[in-house]
Image: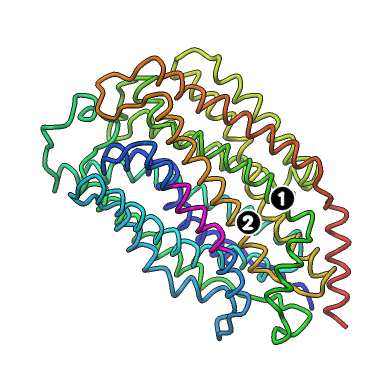
Amino acid sequence: MTIEKIGLKEKIGYGFGDAASSMFWKIFGMYSLFFYTDVLGITAAAAGTMFLIARLWDSFFDVFVGIISDRTKSRYGKYRPYLLWFAIPFAVMGAITFFAPDFGETGKLVYAYITYSLMMIVYSMINVPYASLLGAISSDPTERNSLSSYRMSFAFIGSFVTFMLLQPLIDFFSKTFGTVDLTKTTQAAESSISTSPIGWVMGVGAIGIICIVLFLLCFSWTKERVTQIESEENASIKQDLKNLLHNAPWWILVATGLAALLFNAIRDSVAIYFFRDYVKVNYRMAGTGWDMTTIYFLVGQAANLIGVMAAPSISAKYGKKRTYMIAMLIAGILSTAFYFIPNDITWILIFQFLISVFAGYVLPLLWSMFADIVDHQELITGRRATGLIFSSSSMSQKLGWALGAALSGWILAIFKYAPEAAEQSAQTLFGEHIMISLMPAVCCALAFLGMMFYPLSDKKVKEISEQLNLKRNR
């Protein structure tokens, strides 16, 4: 197979797909716990358990999606058609998930379980094939690294747009269509973001419309080029799964990716609580409606984007494995230092920026390394199970966020978080403090240690790619 140069338009189109996914994923990761506790009205512990159960089983559903997408046959290819089929369901289900019905406590919890689980299913049906598309656009490791960087760059741009728009949209729709709930306590009324249910469902719905457009552009601007060596008719699901379970680099990458995503999940989930209860800076940027929490998120996304954009050149010089390890090590050191800095917004934003730059290096490397594992397994087994392997990357992502969100809910409950309280206790404030600093640092250490055992160096990956291209050209 002749390696085709990937043009700028296609790279941007591929990036649009993760921009759309990330716009919703950031809402889930940074706002959903607050929505469930302070808008829908369920306890932090119940929300944490719901996150774990819904995302845990859905993580394994990703493997099923990977298997069926590997076997999909259409005039659009294997993976691209899912962008077309599920763009609208993705947006509609997102808005439904952030609807707060006036049910009793049990009814609200059941509604949360059902809608959140369905949202994760729809997310899998579009995001797993999208991730797999990386391995089908090009067989060149350099091009895939570039595509992965575009993907992550647009992911952070999408997240940035969400942070810029979501709070102003929620506040706007709340003021326009909502009513004042006089039963809310002083703290809830002065919360950093509106707790009006109509504002949330309409704000998320507006973001969903943008997602539809981006998914359709991704579908239109990309092309599948890479085909596997053996015929698909002889492919065995059982054999694909067996091959995957015997793939040692895959196990290592899933584990290290899980730790890195857990790092992000815990920091992000607690940020709203940390700023409202611990930092207590009463500030909104004129003309934007952004409070200090939103500014904190925006600083983090801008810094992440810097790290993502720098990752290809730095990893090209030092190697993916070494770059990953150094980035996690420094992010862990800075996260530990975050615990000891003064409760001052300048210090907090400086450390948020520095931590997020190094965290930004990691994600594009992870996706590119999963593409390398596809090649590694094809060379060994003769079977290119792209969808299955990339579904495992989505699985580790969801497991990381599931455990992170669950831990956040449980730890808030352990430290006696009370949504109705005008002031949180010293015990609660201590819990929020370690959740945004020391706990993420532990996750960085685990990711660093796991990557030490990863065997696919850049030199090894290049050798694998050359051997596969020789086979394809015979």
Residue 422 image position (x, y, % from top left):
24, 21
Q: Gap in Å between the C-alphas at discs 2 and 1?
A: 9 Å
In the image, what residue occupies the spot 60% across and 19% down? 337
Whether label 2 touches label 1, CB < 8 Å: yes
- Could you tell me the amino acid type at mark 1? Leu
Residue 370 image position (x, y, % from top left):
70, 57
Q: Is residue 221 above or below residue 74?
A: above
From the viewer's perspective, is 313 left or right of 352?
right
> Magenta stretch: residue 56 in it?
yes
Mark 2 secondary-structure assignment: helix
Number of marks in picture: 2
Q: How crowded is mark 1: few (under 14 residues within 10 Å), some or many (20 or more)?
A: many
Q: Which quadrant would residue 360 be assigned to in this image?
A: top right
- Could you tell me the amino acid type at mark 2? Ser
Residue 368 image position (x, y, % from top left):
69, 55
In the image, what residue occupies the spot 84% across and 71% down? 468
Q: How is the image coloured?
A: rainbow
Give the residue pinned by disc 2.
393
Q: Which of 405 and 210 is in front in this view?
A: 405
From the viewer's perspective, is 264 left or right of 274?
right
Q: In this view, does 276 lie above or below 387?
A: above
Q: Which residue lies furthest to the front in this view?
A: 106
Q: What are the residue bounds of the magenta stretch?
A: 51-62
Residue 123 image position (x, y, % from top left):
46, 61
Q: Nearer the viewer, residue 220 or 402?
A: 402
2 or 1: tag closer to the N-terminus: 1
Give the residue pinned by disc 1.
253
